[in-house]
Image (tube, grey):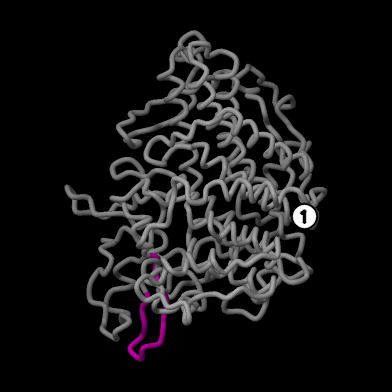
């Protein structure tokens, strides 16, 4: 470990990430005397930290959506085995079958953030105050974001705050860390959010065309964290009455400011429309540099062409989406979820391509959102649409959820989303929502979020956070599931709200204990 002390960053920034690699290198390449010497190096490290953020895009889906009740398990409609069917998608976790290992590799990324914070706070005296604070606002926000994913997945986790390895600690025993309690973990996340807010101050600049962390991203994270804190019990962390008001203040501060819904849903994710007015923060993907993993949600021609019929009962004879054998159907949404969209809802076929048998019976769907563009030089498809983390539609639907908790009228927020979804077809008498009971409102908000945020890593977190009439999580309500009369989790399986820690991680650190039930 003593040779893995400093990080080499090779990044060229030309308005987008065009190349970016992070790796550990021997300390005699870059030591304290040759790195952290100028603003360009600090900025490069920050870009590298965003490359690490981009690397977790699969985990955002797996941890935040895959187990949420909308995914098929086993084999897909094209006869291909689906990935992560067990234990993630079917919630069959055991201590030997955890789905994710080594804390999803988040701690190696947190280590880099800790190193950045330590150096910028204590050594980078060449930075002026405004520049230094902007960097720290980003870093504290990113660290809170990582820990919030870990918290919602595992509950209390080890709170690694210092770059011990970077400071020369090589003894394994000294690097072990017990798990903090859930309350200690959530308190730490809130503290990092406060540090981020304080550092940003009034600086609302968003760099790299919405591809870099900003004050607005911290504000969205704050709203999400405090809404979770106001509703979700985890171990010794109980809902805090004042947190709903904090969430409301954060989320409402973004309404009608610098963000708005785009007129067309499909334009949010278009390759040529990155950093548009709806986006608050996105993980940046660029042709020639990096691709997202939407290819695993599409098809291979041999399994698709000359096999199925389109919605007009015409046999599909060509590569409809020009995937060019770059994809495979390893993930598929349930038919019941697809048919829950009304045909007039433009999100339906901006998100899915549906296909049928010769008798017009629905066979399945493939994902069409975020599948990138065709490279002009090669003619090949590249899956380089951005992975959007926060956008204005989430602001509106979070406000609807907060309003429902307050006993208010949620219809205006839901209908603003629906009006965009239906476009010129919108008729409030047909498609509008009328405020109802708490539970009906909560379900309406959930189902609107389901349709709006497909693949954006929110569905599991939503049913974990949102309530039925008895204030129990919707994860235990059959009304929140698709293609089943059972809930996503039975109440007898409540322990599965938290994931188990894999055996290797437990064996490598004798201070760690697994979650109850495993």
Say whether residue 261 is visible.
yes
Q: Quadrant of residue 90?
A: bottom right
Which one is nearer the viewer's eye here, 81 or 320? 320
- Left or right: 3 as drawn, with respect to 274: right
Q: Is residue 357 magenta?
A: yes
Classified by dominant secondary structure, the portion drawn in magenta counts as strand
Instruction: Look at the picture and state if 459 lies above or below 149.
Output: below
- Which residue lies most toward the right here? 236
Please provide the residue range marked out in magenta. Answer: 354-367
Q: Find residue 107 and report its horizontal and vertical position in percent.
A: 61, 36
Image quadrant holding the C terminus, namely: bottom right
Say whether residue 502 is visible.
no
- Which residue lies most toward the top here? 33
Q: Find residue 99 and report its horizontal and vertical position in percent.
A: 61, 55
Which one is nearer the viewer's eye here, 272 or 227? 227
- Residue sitting at x 31%, y 82%: 309
Q: Find residue 140 and report its horizontal and vertical position in percent.
A: 59, 32
- Residue sitting at x 26%, y 61%: 324
Instruction: Look at the picture and state if 268 lies above or below 132.
Output: below
Q: Is residue 491 magenta?
A: no
Image quadrant holding the N terminus, namely: top right
- Residue sitting at x 56%, y 40%: 218
Q: Quadrant of residue 141?
A: top right
- Left or right: 433 as drawn, with respect to 421: right
Per the image, label 1 sits on a secondary structure element best described as loop
- Which residue lies most toward the left here? 377
- Residue sitting at x 54%, y 51%: 60
* Disc 1: which residue: 233
Which one is nearer the viewer's eye here, 67 or 339? 339
Which one is nearer the viewer's eye here, 515 or 370? 370
Q: Find residue 287 and report its horizontal and vertical position in percent.
A: 29, 45
How packed mark 1 is, by other alpha carbons closer than 10 Å (few <14, some 14-19, many 20 or more), is some
């Amino acid at each position: 470990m003593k040779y893995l002390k400093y990080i080499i960053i090779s990044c060229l920034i030309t308005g987008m990430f065009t190349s970016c690699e992070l790796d550990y290198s021997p300390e005699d390449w870059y030591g304290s005397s040759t790195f952290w010497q100028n603003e360009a190096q600090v900025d490069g490290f920050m870009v590298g930290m965003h490359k690490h953020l981009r690397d977790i895009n699969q985990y955002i889906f797996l941890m935040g959506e895959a187990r949420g009740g909308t995914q098929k398990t086993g084999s897909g409609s094209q006869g291909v085995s689906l990935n992560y069917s067990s234990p993630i998608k079917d919630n069959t976790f055991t201590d030997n079958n955890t789905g994710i290992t080594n804390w999803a590799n988040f701690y190696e990324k947190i280590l880099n953030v800790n190193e950045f914070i330590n150096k910028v706070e204590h050594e980078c005296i060449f930075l002026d105050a405004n520049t230094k604070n902007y960097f720290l606002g980003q870093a504290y926000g990113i660290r809170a974001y990582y820990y919030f994913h870990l918290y919602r997945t595992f509950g209390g986790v080890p709170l690694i705050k210092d770059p011990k390895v970077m400071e020369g600690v090589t003894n394994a025993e000294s690097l072990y860390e017990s798990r903090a309690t859930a309350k200690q973990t959530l308190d730490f996340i809130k503290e990092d959010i406060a540090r981020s807010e304080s550092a940003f101050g009034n600086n609302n600049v968003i760099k790299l065309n919405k591809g870099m962390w900003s004050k607005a991203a911290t504000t969205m994270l704050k709203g999400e964290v405090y809404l979770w804190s106001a509703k979700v019990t985890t171990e010794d962390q109980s809902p805090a009455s004042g947190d709903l008001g904090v969430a409301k203040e954060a989320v409402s501060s973004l309404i009608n400011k610098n963000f708005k819904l785009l007129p067309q849903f499909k334009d949010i994710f278009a390759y040529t429309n990155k950093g548009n007015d709806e986006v608050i923060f996105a993980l940046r993907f660029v042709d020639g540099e990096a691709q997202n993993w939407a290819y695993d949600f599409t098809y291979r021609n041999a399994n698709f062409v000359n096999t199925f019929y389109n919605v007009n009962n015409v046999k599909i004879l060509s590569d409809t989406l020009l995937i060019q054998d770059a994809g495979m159907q390893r993930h598929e949404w349930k038919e019941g979820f697809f048919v829950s969209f009304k045909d007039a809802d433009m999100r339906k076929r901006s998100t899915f391509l549906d296909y049928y048998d010769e008798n017009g019976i629905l066979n399945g769907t493939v994902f069409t959102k975020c599948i990138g563009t065709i490279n002009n030089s090669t003619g090949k498809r590249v899956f380089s649409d951005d992975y959007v983390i926060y956008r204005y539609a989430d602001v509106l639907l979070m406000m609807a959820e907060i309003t429902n908790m307050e006993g208010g009228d949620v219809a205006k927020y839901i209908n603003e989303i629906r009006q965009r979804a239906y476009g010129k077809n919108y008729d409030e008498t047909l498609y509008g929502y009328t405020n109802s009971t708490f539970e009906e409102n909560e379900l309406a908000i959930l189902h609107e979020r389901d349709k709006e945020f497909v693949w954006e890593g929110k569905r599991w977190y939503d049913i974990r956070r949102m309530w039925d009439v008895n204030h129990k999580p919707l994860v235990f309500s059959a009304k929140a599931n698709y293609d089943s009369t059972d809930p996503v989790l039975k109440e007898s399986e409540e322990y599965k709200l938290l994931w188990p820690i894999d055996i290797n991680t437990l064996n490598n650190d004798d201070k760690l204990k697994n979650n109850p039930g495993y």
